[in-house]
Image: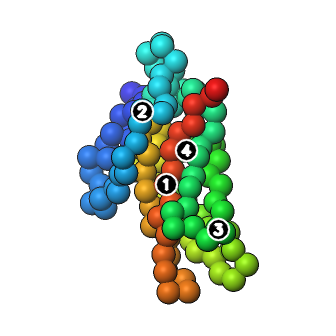
Amino acid sequence: MTTTRREFLSGIMHGALVPVVVGLGSSGCSDGGTPGDSLRDGGPTECSSIGARVTFNHGHTIEVPLADVEAGNSKTYTVVSNGSHSHTVLVTAEQFAAIATGTMVTATTTLNSGHMHGVEITCVMPT
């Protein structure tokens, strides 16, 4: 028996003990009109890229590749230095699954230089 990406991610989401912090967002990703062809079903997505924004920002940057959302594995990113310090942020498999369905998620960076940041990640539709 073959397990689809949707079934696998649904199992993870229902069995997760760690809550997923989900911000307000829109339905950015959608299936291409044919059942089984969306990212959440294991197929391609209409997302052209992934947008990531650092809140309360003072010069930090972060890039989340679309391939990381497609892979769906937890990953730690470096929120690039603003010249004096940097932070890291963990994006969980559950959060990647939410992004793949078009939901914007918010993850929190590590504490550095006395503060943290939120990182908002969302699917960007082609123009």
Q: Residues within 10 Å of mark 2 (few under 14, many from 20)?
A: some
Q: Which quadrant: the C terminus?
A: top right
Q: CA distance from mark 1 to mark 2?
A: 15 Å
Residue 4, image x, y percentages: 42, 30
Q: Is residue 51 visible?
A: yes
Going by the numbered disc 2, the residue's amino acid type is: Ser
User: Residue 27, labelled with which disc?
Assistant: 2
Sequence-first tag of 4 and 2: 2
Residue lying farthest top?
34
Q: Which quadrant: the N terminus?
A: top left
**Residue at the disc numbered 4:** 69
**Residue at the disc numbered 1:** 120
Sequence-first tag of 2 and 3: 2
The residue that appears at 33% across and 39% down in the rendered structure is 10
* Occupied quadrant, residue 45: top right
For residue 85, above or below residue 58: below
Q: Secondary structure at mark 1?
A: strand
Sequence-first tag of 3 and 1: 3
> Is 82 placed left or right of 109 in the picture?
right
* Occupied quadrant, residue 80: bottom right
Residue lying farthest bottom?
114
